[in-house]
Amino acid sequence: MVTKSEHNKIAFVLDHDLKEYRIPFFNHLAKCGYKLSVFHTGNYSSDRIDFDICKVSSVKVMGFEYRKLPNFNGYDTVVHMQNIRILNLWFLTMNPFRRFKIIHWGIGVSSGNGLKKQNKAIIFLRQILCFFSDATILYSSYPISYYNSRLNEKLFVANNTVHSPLSQNSSVFNKEYFIFIGSLNSRKGLLDLIDAYNNYTLNVDKTNLLKLMIVGDGPLMSTLVAKVSELDLENYVIFKGMISDDVEKKSLFEKAVMSISPQQAGLSVLESFSYGVPCLVYENAISGGEHLNVKNYETGFRVKNKKQLYYIMLKMSSSRALSVYMGNRAYNFYHSNRSISGMAQPFISLFNGEC
């Protein structure tokens, strides 16, 4: 229970447009009693929010961005996304006259080529920022090893997650397909998924054959449809289009034996877990750390390539007990370790001066 939040003014400065999946997190903080303002460059509007939304303009400056932000000296704490290309992050952090606490929030390392590929110069810059900040909150514990140990007292972890309003454990339900859910682009490894699935259909016992459900839309759609046609898989691969309705998503997850997102793994991992659906990702997936929630033979599989992906498809088709076991583990992990309230707690502790 928050006891020090009254009149505590908090500003969040995002490095992207405000996304729908973040609303429950900000609403949770607002309901704890904080006067919350979220600054972003988009046009989001909703009647389901308990905080203030402030649209700001942005100017491009030689590969960097500058946001036209207000004077924050009337706030108690400013939380700024840890995007080193946004000049305001530097100005706010280094300002010797600021009267507010500055907290950085983000992945903590670069993620564009997988978390293991890091530029030493960029890591050094992140450490400078961390040193001058009051605290840095990370999406996962993974980046901590990249920071000097003398900065550990400033590093906190708020495991990135997503609210799933209709969460249920569907691990024991009848399963009909593997599922991919997300935008259809070249970064996701969807061509690998189609190739692996094709190999699967050629070798699986037909009494155990599961279909492949692809939920989403994007620039790769026509390429995927053509690939499926070329491999004569039209009767086995289902393109569902983009779905945002929670009731419809719940009905889709109920029949999914496993969620697959090979080369890019984000919050869809946690959403899958919330329905008791284990997840498969590549070990080097582009991710903010969400793929690290996948533990082999516990909450899913982390594999190296499409050959291993194909083998896991065969295994999941033939072992119902394994599917149920991992589905239960995934569901329990989500509710025990990745709730919105759990994600919010490190922020609350810092806002209240408890750490």
Image (cartoon, grey):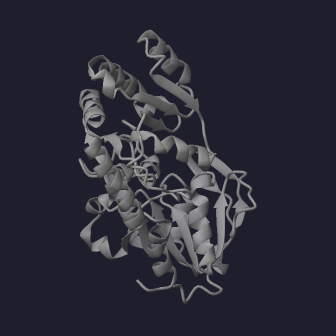
Q: Residue 25 at x, y = what percent? A: 56, 65
Q: Is residue 170 above or below residue 213?
A: below
Q: Residue 63 at x, y = what percent? A: 54, 43
Quadrant of the rendered image containing residue 79: bottom right
* In-image side of 303 versus 339 (left or right): left
**For the point 24% across and 47% down, which residue is it?**
296
Q: Please tell me which residue lies in front, 32 or 175.
A: 175
**For the point 48% across and 16% down, which residue is it?**
234
Q: Farthest bottom residue?
A: 3
**For the point 39% across and 46% down, which residue is it?**
287
* In-image side of 166 versus 138 (left or right): right
Q: Is residue 18 above or below residue 311?
A: below
Q: Please tell me which residue lies in front, 78 or 230.
A: 230
Q: Please tell me which residue lies in front, 333 or 355.
A: 333
Quadrant in which the C terminus is drawn: bottom left
**For the point 38% across and 28% down, which residue is it?**
193
Q: Is residue 21 above or below residue 176?
A: below
Q: Residue 92 at x, y = what percent? A: 55, 68
Quadrant of the rendered image containing residue 11: bottom right
